[in-house]
Amino acid sequence: MRSRALVLVATLLTATIWGGWYAVSHRPFPPENTPEGAYARIALFVADRRARDAFPYLETEAQWAAYTVRDVRKKASDRVRASYPAGERNRWLDAWQKEAEAADGADVFALLARQGGWIARLERDLSGVGRVEVQGERATVVTARGTRYPFRRRDNGIWGLTIFTAELQAEAERATRDLEVVERAAEDYDRVRPP
């Protein structure tokens, strides 16, 4: 009789734990047009190591910068291929290949996030939402650990994380400066190339 009672208690306890886990892990996300919803999706993608999938939850300027990196690196690579001598050509093409051949801005973001350790930085600090502070088009998600994540409302209503914008814009500016250097050198190579 006593063993039956223990089995019953153990079964009920197990069912309660599994039921609680299931309820927590399968509860619906907050809508993506809320700061909490955007943050929850980013946290999920970071936990699953899917940086590319977090791209829609970056602010617009960050997304544009990632596309700019890809487009400018492709243009510079094309110019290098067309005008640079072989020895010089490979050095530049190898350095820019992944960015130039990226399918889109999300792939560039994922690449730069890996190289820059951005995902590791997020992994250290992500926790549950403690509170949200909204001021007009800007919001801050404050986690249970006290970490603050700034967001800006995008034109489509989705809130975009802003912490990578400056780094992405700096990379886009670097790519643009590199393209200018490539263009000048390519003109010189074209001028001295035998007919």
Image: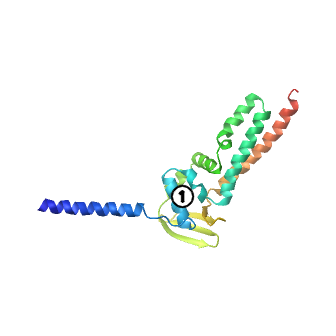
Q: Is residue 19 above or below residue 177?
A: below
Q: Is residue 20 above or below residue 111?
A: below
Q: Which amino acid does label 1 sit on?
A: Ile
User: What residue sits 83% from the left and 33% below the top?
Assistant: 189
Q: How is the image coloured?
A: rainbow
User: What residue sits 47% from the left and 61% below the top?
Assistant: 127
Q: Where is residue 15 in the image (x, y as percent from the top left)?
A: 29, 61
Locate the C terminus and report the quarter of the image it occupies: top right
Q: In this view, does 42 lie above or below 157?
A: above
User: What residue sits 85% from the left and 33% below the top?
Assistant: 190
Q: Is residue 14 above or below residue 139?
A: above
Residue at image mark 1:
42
Most extreme residue toward the bottom is: 135
Locate the N terminus and report the quarter of the image it occupies: bottom left
Give residue 134's quadrant in the image: bottom right
Quick check: 122 left or right of 62? left
Q: Position of residue 163 (x, y in %)?
A: 61, 59
Give residue 136's quadrant in the image: bottom right
Is label 1 in a helix, a strand or a loop?
Answer: helix
Give residue 7's quadrant in the image: bottom left
Q: Position of residue 115 (x, y in %)?
A: 59, 45
- Graded by Cα atoms within 10 Å as few (under 14), some (14 to 19) or many (20 or more), the crowding at tag 1 reads many
Most extreme residue toward the top is: 194
Quick check: 81 left or right of 110? right
